[in-house]
Image (cartoon, rainbow, N blue to C red):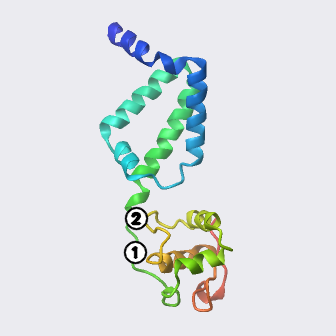
Amino acid sequence: MEQVTAKVDQLLQPLTRSPWNAVLTLAIVLYAGLASQPLPAPVRGLFNNTLFRVLIMFLILWIGNHDPALSIVVAVAFVLTLTLASGMENFEGPQTYARQGCLNIKLYDLLAAYGGSKDDLITDMQRARVPLQFKLSDEYAPFIATILNDNLGKKFSETCQPPNGTKTSLS
């Protein structure tokens, strides 16, 4: 067992050197800031692979013996990524529900309501918990508009507005 530990230490030793440690910490912190974005399919596939998960947990434990602070950062990023990889891509809610008045909404209308700011639209989509498979396209625009109506009280046209004309909000 000591030979295995020595071999792993030798293999992972570059991660404990100061420049690599700083680069790894910075990369993880920057990634954590982007963690709310949809994960690409290959990354989701990796995090849904049991062997890969065990490897990452082993890496977290090994780093914990050498740098506990970095180990905590890696563990938090790992848990956030697991959450994104396992839960959000399997939305099973009403995928065909769009308010009748929103059926004619297009991507252009969504963007126009946000002054052309795609970033603001995406931020509100995340706040309103729009499922990740609802991509920004004309096909999904009526669904996105309906969810933004219901959860954020966003009005897109005279016919596509919140229920009863009242503004709601998420807590």
Q: Is residue 28 left or right of residue 114?
A: left
Please indicate, yes or no, whether residue 59 appears anywhere in the rendered image: yes
Query: Does residue 48 lie above or below 135 as drawn?
Result: above
Q: Residue 47: which quarter of the image?
A: top left
Residue 92: horizontal and vertical position, in percent? Answer: 37, 67
Are there few (<14), some (14-19), or many (20+) residues within 10 Å of tag 1? few
Q: Nearer the viewer, residue 30 or 4?
A: 30
Please indicate, yes or no, whether residue 149 appears anywhere in the rendered image: no
Residue at mark 1: 95
| Numbered disc 2: secondary structure | loop
Mark linked to residue 91:
2
For the point 35% across and 8% down, the residue is 2
For the point 33% across and 8% down, the residue is 3
For the point 56% across and 49% down, the residue is 34
Query: Does residue 150 lie above or below 125 as drawn?
Result: below
Q: Is residue 15 left or right of residue 50?
A: right
Q: Is residue 113 left or right of residue 61?
A: right
For the point 45% across and 49% down, the residue is 83
Residue 123: horizontal and vertical position, in percent? Answer: 61, 63
| Numbered disc 1: secondary structure | loop
Q: Residue 70: which quarter of the image?
A: top right
**Quadrant in the picture for the N terminus:** top left
Residue type at mark 2 is: Phe
**Quadrant in the picture for the C terminus:** bottom right
Residue type at mark 1 is: Gln
Query: Does residue 97 lie above or below 58 as drawn?
Result: below
Q: Is residue 85 left or right of residue 73?
A: left
Mark linked to residue 118:
none
